[in-house]
Image: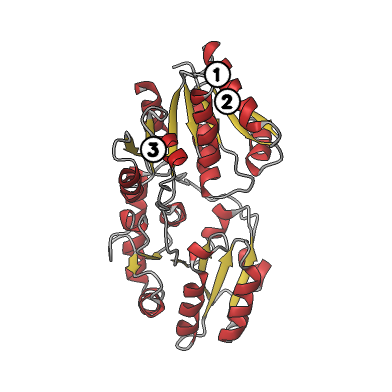
Amino acid sequence: MKGVIHINLARSWRGGERQVALLMKELKRASVPQVLVCLRGSSLHKYSRDNHLPHKSFSNVGLFFFVPLLIRIWGLQKKYDVVHCHESRGHTLAFLARYLFGSKIKTVVHRRVLFPIRSKPFTLLKYSPKYVDRVVCISRAVELVVKQAVPHASTLVIPSGVPIPTEVGEKEFDLRMNFGVASDIKIVAYIAALSEEKDHRTFLKTAKIVLESRKDVCFMLIGDGILLEDLTQYTRELGIEDKVIFAGFQTMINQIIGQTDLLLFTSKSEGLGSTILDYFVHKRPVISSRNGGSEELIFEGETGFLCPVGDAQCFAKKLLNLLWDENAIQRITQNAYGFASENFSVEIIAQRTLELYENL
């Protein structure tokens, strides 16, 4: 193949942006020509610049005219033959390249969320097989959502990938020292943006129940977002502010995960849940809500535990049963590590994506 244009116009760094970075690094190792179209000053722009990934950054001014025209020009020059849209605004740019300028470059759209596709005429036109050659879904649950809105869409399930660490290396960030957590205290963590769909209130309700039985545990929220003030206030209302740590956005997640004891993942809706995979490969146990994507990673009692969305009593019961049962933790984390290694390594996912490009 000639090469691929990646488009991601997100300004911040979340799971989808991390997946773009991981994919591009693997394709670079495979000597695949590629370029990332991103927003100037965005997290992906800075990452690409610092890690020497080929990219072109643009401001919002004229973005929706100039980039579609540029895609068409690149196609005429035969520089690239696939455009891979990693979020909705990137999808719009690729659609305009075909709709306005007659681009012949194959279009791949990546769906990572369970939110329904809106039934507005413009949205359905964007997803029609005339303008999208393949919709990549990160789970069967996401594929079902796409098929419900666009029955004739050509879909393919390729999940998120996760680096399989061979060694942690020297600890550059000491989580316990930075946040004053004693060595005999268990750390129950949740790594997610502070937004409504992540349901941090259920996490905090669970903390309240658990702390009534055990004092040798603390609860840590890693991430930032618009709900920080509300969640801080809710923690005070529950009377557990001395046992809950708001750690904010952290960059050294790979090291942080290994210093926590368990992931309590209370999200209401997930396309897959790549944070769960990160915990799998770090051999840390996971208790998650049944949020759509998580059920494709967690098999009850084998690779983790599941609870209904919003059921703090269920989360608390399973956490209390598991967190001090070393034999159960050892068995479950070994199972989860093997499952992730065999099915979700970044090398496997990048190879499947490359095969998709070549087939198109």
Label 3 SS: strand
Type of the residue with mark 3? Val
Residue 87 visible in the displayed image: no
- Amino acid under label 1? Arg
State how many labels appear: 3
In the image, residue 104 above or below residue 13: above
Q: Residues within 10 Å of mark 2 (few under 14, many from 20)?
A: many
| Mark-to-mark CA distance, 3 and 1 | 22 Å
Q: Give the residue at x 47% y 45%.
A: 166
Q: Nearer the viewer, residue 60 or 307?
A: 60
Say which mark, if any, is on residue 72. 1
- Label 2 sits on a secondary structure element that is helix
Q: Position of residue 139 (x, y in %)?
A: 35, 47
Q: Dots 2 and 1: beta carbons under 8 Å?
A: yes
Q: Which mark is residue 68?
A: 2
Element under label 1?
helix
Crowdedness near tag 1: few (<14), some (14–19) or many (≥20) residues, C-alpha within 10 Å: many
Q: Is tag 3's residue or tag 1's residue first in the polypeptide sequence?
A: 1
Task: Tell me where residue 67 appears, x and y as whole percent.
Answer: 61, 27
Badge 3 crowding class, 10 Å Cα cut-off, few under 14, some 14 to 19, many 20 or more, is: many
| Residue on which disc 3 sits | 136
Q: CA distance from mark 2 to mark 1?
A: 6 Å
Nearest to viewer (mark 3 / mark 2) = 2
Amino acid type assigned to the residue bearing label 2 in the image: Pro
Residue at 36% over, 67% down: 329
127 relative to 24 in the view: left or right: left
Q: Nearer the viewer, residue 343 or 166?
A: 343
Q: Which mark is residue 167?
A: none
If the image is split into quadrants, where does the N terminus sit?
Answer: top left
Name which of mark 3 and mark 2 comes first in the sequence.
2
Q: Residue furthest top?
A: 77
